[in-house]
Image (spheres, coloured by chain):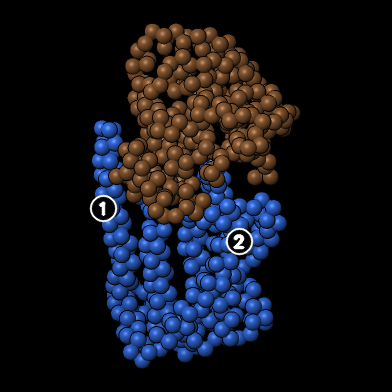
Chain colours: A blue, B brown
Amino acid sequence: MSEIVHNVAKASSKKSFAISAGNIDRIMNIASPLGLLLLWEVAARFGWIDVRFFPAPSKIFVTMLELIQNGQLWIHLKASMYRLFWGFVWGGVPALLLGISMGLNRTLRSIMDPLVSATYPIPKSAILPLILLIFGLGEPSKVVMVAIGLFFPILINTMAGVLEIQKIYFDVSKNFGADRYQVFMTVALPGAMPLIMTGVKLGVGMGLILISLAEMIGAKSGLGYMMWNAWEILSVETMYVGLLVIAALGVLFTVVLNEIERYLVPWKAAR
Amino acid sequence: MAGYEAPAVVAPDQSIMGPDVKIRLKNVSKVFETRKGPFVALDSITLDIPTGCFFMLVGPSGCGKTTLLRILAGLETHTSGTIEIAKPADGRPGNSMIFQGDSLFPWMTVWENASYGLAMRRKPAAEIKEKVSHFLNRTGLLRFADYYPHQLSGGMRQRVSIARAFSNDPDILLMDEPFSALDEQNKVMLQEELLKIWEETRKTVLFITHSVDEAVTLGDRIMVMTAHPGREKATLDVPFERPRQVLELRARPEYGEFVFNIWSYLRDEVQRARAQDEGRTS
């Protein structure tokens, strides 16, 4: 039994090391964008950069406060988030189910693989006119754009995740009498989860890109619209507010998704 | 994942084997189609495994013994011959396998891994709790129930595999060199524990190993297999009484004699396997 005790001591010391390393990572994650902002502010104050194009962060911040106070920012943010959410549902869920099915089923994979390879490289921005034509100028076209953008990274990563699961785990589930649904739930889904999370992270980034793009054309709300409108009325600060909010959203999503990953994949996070 | 055909399962009342035979193989062969042509993994294996027998298959690596086990586990099909397995009367699972190397799901805790078979058969929570805690306790792992496999040593992981198979309460246990990756001290400890847990239930066991010591220590009957293609070379009954203490048994002079006896059958086959390997690589 001494072997067991020894091993536990080793495992716990490993864990505490991982936490402190994680804290350092988190501090660095916050410090690097703050440093860049500080540099920018200094450069604008000393006239090293053209403030017509690169207004000082403090001025952008003042504009942001105005937009928060008059409720404009909230309206646009809400509109974009709403589209992003439904795009995530309509794009992510089918991608997850199809990705796992393609990973499990060779026939389905050989049918779908050429279709995926052919449609994946088409620039999503290039199909915006077609989407507008089909779904009109209203909400659906924006949601569809996000859904398409999310669909591919999640699909491809999910399938790769299932294919990467070692065969022995499928043997175990078969030997212990798991049915199809149980294989899906106890082997394919958890086994592919690390790569699924990678796909979701890439997909959310793609969704943010596409939502701002889609909102610049034929929308009356959303962060993309806010920035496009700011260009038309030459309010450079508002454009930057839009960019900053999108950047902040990117960071926020990454942090939230990393926490979700830690919860869903505890067996990888501790390694 | 091609469609596979499970070995014939015979209900106890229609069995032609009689109540004392659990597994009967007749001229079972397995041929793999490879690019270089057919590869005979198993050649006409015929054997009877009595109910409650701890049956050992010993052979040089590559003799097809794992293939035989996988066929019985329903993970592979045989090419020809007949396989009959007596079906448990009370709806218990036919067999559970203890795999070689790491087969615990890394995404499940020790508890979830050990309860896997029962959970897949949708057993009531109370029954799962009772059986799993019993076997985790017997393998000394109850207080590690919430650990993930990567937090355990190799020996502990293999104990969880044993608990997983025993908790499932199968009619037959199939073991594919479960201890081959362990160091010598761990191996002896796990053999000892396996014997103790097995004494409680005396299930039919088919155990594969390339270690003659392991075969003599654990088994009631030993079948020595030839190098590729896998055939029966000899079958011997182990003359040692139960319950056994691993180290005490190994200290006895008769033990050494019996091991030597098995080796005399195996030696030529190991040399042949080696010659085949060298022929393949040169």
The residue that appears at 39% across and 80% down in the rendered structure is A241
Chain identity of mark 1: A
**Eyeballing the image, is B162 above or below A91?**
above
Residue B145 pos. (x, y %): 34, 47
**Callout 1, which amino acid?**
Ser
Mark 1: few/some/many CA within 10 Å (<14, 14-19, 20+): few
In the picture, the quarter occupied by the C terminus of chain B is: top right
Residue B12: % across, % down: 61, 37
| Total number of numbered discs in the rendering | 2
Q: Position of residue B40 (x, y in %)?
A: 69, 25
The label on residue A20 is 1
In the image, A175 versus A58, the foreground residue is A175
Q: Residue at x 32, y 44 (%)?
A: B142
Q: Which is nearer the N-term, disc 2 or disc 1?
A: 1
Q: Is mark 1 on a helix, strand or loop?
A: helix
Mark 2: secondary structure: helix
**Residue identifier under label 2:** A98
